[in-house]
Image: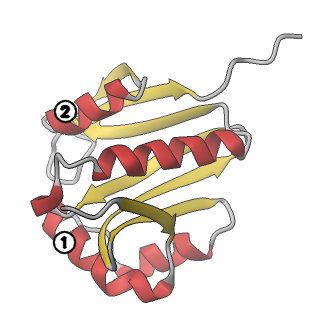
Amino acid sequence: MTEPVRIRRFRLTDMSALLAIEQACFPGEAFDEALFRRFAAKGSALFLVALCGRRLVGYSLAERSGPDAELVSIAVAPELRRRGVGQALLGATLGRLRRAGCRVCRLSVRTTNTAAIRLYERHGFRRLRRIVKYYADGADALRMRKELAAPVRR
């Protein structure tokens, strides 16, 4: 990857490339087009894509609820991992959530996904607890949390 990563909001014209990445990253448990369309239509969703040149190479999806946010999913084309795309997506997502007034971001990640866990920890996420049999295949999840802004003192 010689071109810089550019982050922008998701557009419906991105759908086919996004679905291909989703299938490559999460075979057997990929989100479907209908779910992505529902998130894209929600005002509470922050739906970003990463581009290298004109190629869509990743996405992030977060949902806001008052001062809280949930990182629903983040994915990078397998052949472009470890090249800064995930860092760029996560950094942009957290920055935009912070600017939107969110104070906390939470996420769930497979306990076996050590690369993702390291990425989240580098961005300041803390491990909260293990959730047994969280995924449809019976795998456990690790629940994580990051403070996005200093708590308001009263």
Q: Nearer the viewer, residue 8 or 136?
A: 8
Q: What residue is drawn where x is 16% and y is 59%?
A: 80
Q: What residue is drawn where x is 44% and y is 74%?
A: 36
Q: Measuring from the top left, give residue 130's x and y in whole percent.
A: 29, 25
Q: Measuring from the top left, give residue 94's x and y in whole percent.
A: 53, 41
Q: Which of marks 1 and 2 is in front?
A: 1
Report whether residue 26 is seen.
Answer: no
- Residue 7 placement, left or right of 18: right
Residue type highlighted by circle 2 = Thr
- Residue 91 placement, left or right of 52: right
Q: Quadrant of the C terminus?
A: top right
Q: Residue 23 carries which label?
A: 1
- Residue 52 placement, left or right of 8: left
Q: What residue is drawn where x is 37% and y is 54%?
A: 73
Q: In this view, does 25 lie above or below 134?
A: below
Q: Measuring from the top left, give residue 31's x and y in whole percent.
A: 32, 69
Residue 23: name its quadrant: bottom left
Residue at which label 2 appears: 111
Q: What residue is drawn where x is 34% and y is 32%?
A: 120
Q: Circle 1 — which element?
A: helix
Q: In this view, does 119 lie above or below 89?
A: above
Question: For the residues marked 1 and 2, what is the alpha-carbon distance in whole angstroms?
Answer: 20 Å
- Residue 106 placement, left or right of 31: right
- Alpha-carbon neighbours of circle 1 within 10 Å: few (<14), some, or many (≥20)? some
Report whether residue 79 is seen.
Answer: yes
Q: Is residue 68 above or below residue 37?
A: above
Q: Circle 2 — which element?
A: loop
Residue type highlighted by circle 1 = Gln
